[in-house]
Amino acid sequence: MPTPDVRSTVDTAIGIAVDGGLHHLDPADDLERDADTSFAAARERSDRLERAIVADPVGHRLLTGDRPTGDLHLGHYIGTLANRVRLQNLGVQTFVVIADYQVIADRDAIGPIRERVRSLVADYLAAGLDPDRTVIFPHSAVPALNQLMVPFLSLVSVAELERNPTVKAELTMSNRPLGALLFTYPVHQAADILCCGGTVVPVGRDQLPHLELTRLIARRFNDRYGPVFTEPGALLSAAPVVLGTDGAKMGKSRGNAIALGASEDETAAVVRAARTDGERRITYEPDRRPEVANLLTIASILSGEPAERLAERIGDAGAAALKRVVTEVVNESLRPLRARRRELVAEPEYLDSVLLRGIATVTTVAGLTLDAVRHAMGTTYLQR
């Protein structure tokens, strides 16, 4: 498979020369500027990767996934699911991991895990993922994948894991002491990606550090033991972040989401509760009126009508009219998905069969990867 050039090094500016002297900048300004520069470079590489995928879709392998901690919601549909279906339909080899072990990374009880895994599979299939073209599997059922964690852990330092911003964010949200599974979550994610030979990983901006650690592990293994892994490239999402009813990012655990499997009445109730502001006239101003802009964006993405035109059409009718429009658009857009989802949920044996097919495929693929790792490390004791 082709390996896109996704390496970059961003030098941190520490000062500027003015009139022959060095005037140091505020470190916070340096960090912000460096982050913006790094993201711009990542976006440019992502655009190149997108063009390469369109030119040769079968030459790429996609790895993406979710934790089974609850039902998927509208934010997932807009932000990730629709893009997965698009890439699958282009012909990209698509692998979707259900990260069930990671459910216990930040909680004591695993909950109704089997029902939630089935629910995820139903969401995937109802959204358009095809088990004949997409491999869906829970990573707990693939021993070779989890065994890769051991050599991978030897390739990263504690300091590198501590610097990962996503680990810090997860720790803050979990309100509990940092456990070893959560701490090593990025390494486990690297095993998910590399065991399948993933070359394309769709990510948001906040997930770039995770993928960079995966690339680092692949690079260090290759440098130490010989070429085994391809460094995966980040395919940045072009979809906007969808806010929940409280104005924060829509999330499964935040109680602010429109579940894909919700009824039309439940959807209407969630949208009615969405935060707006005190101005009656509806305008599309994302910076000044983010909550109103979020509702317009949802309706725009699902209907195809520009957000500005929607705002003009609603005009002085106010927030109540805006919410009615959003409710109608969401329910109309999700009606076929929800009908298909109800059919799938009623067939748990079929959902399990999709998982079993995926487990069988990934067990073979990951086994070959582990064999290559053992060969490179010289630990093939049972082979002559």
Image (tube, grey):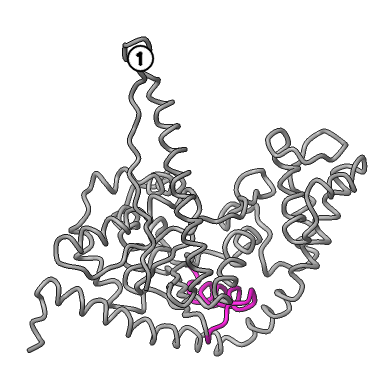
Residue lying at 10% horizontally and 86% vertically, measured from the top left: 382
> Residue 123, position in %: x, y?
60, 73
Q: Which residue is labeled 1 in the image?
A: 23
Q: Residue furthest right?
A: 317
Which of the image's four quarters has the N terminus?
A: bottom left
Vertical relation: 28 (above or below) 368: above
> Residue 48, position in %: x, y?
48, 58
Which of the image's four quarters has the C terminus?
A: bottom left
Residue 71 visible in the displayed image? no
Magenta span has 86?
no
Q: Nearer the viewer, residue 367 or 197?
A: 197
Residue lying at 39% horizontally and 19% vertically, measured from the top left: 25
Vertical relation: 126 (above or below) 185: below
> Residue 160, position in %: x, y?
26, 46
* Residue type beneath disc 1: His
> Residue 349, position in %: x, y?
55, 90
Quadrant hosting residue 32:
top left
Residue 328 visible in the displayed image? yes
Side of 24 where 58 appears, left or right: right
- Number of residues whose C-alpha sits closer than 10 Å to that of mark 1, classed few (under 14), some (14–19) or many (20 or more): few
Magenta span has 119?
yes
Residue lying at 76% horizontally and 67% vertically, measured from the top left: 333
Q: Which residues are magenta?
A: 111-132
The secondary element bearing badge 1 is classed as strand
Q: Nearer the viewer, residue 360 or 1?
A: 1
Side of 299 where 249 appears, left or right: left
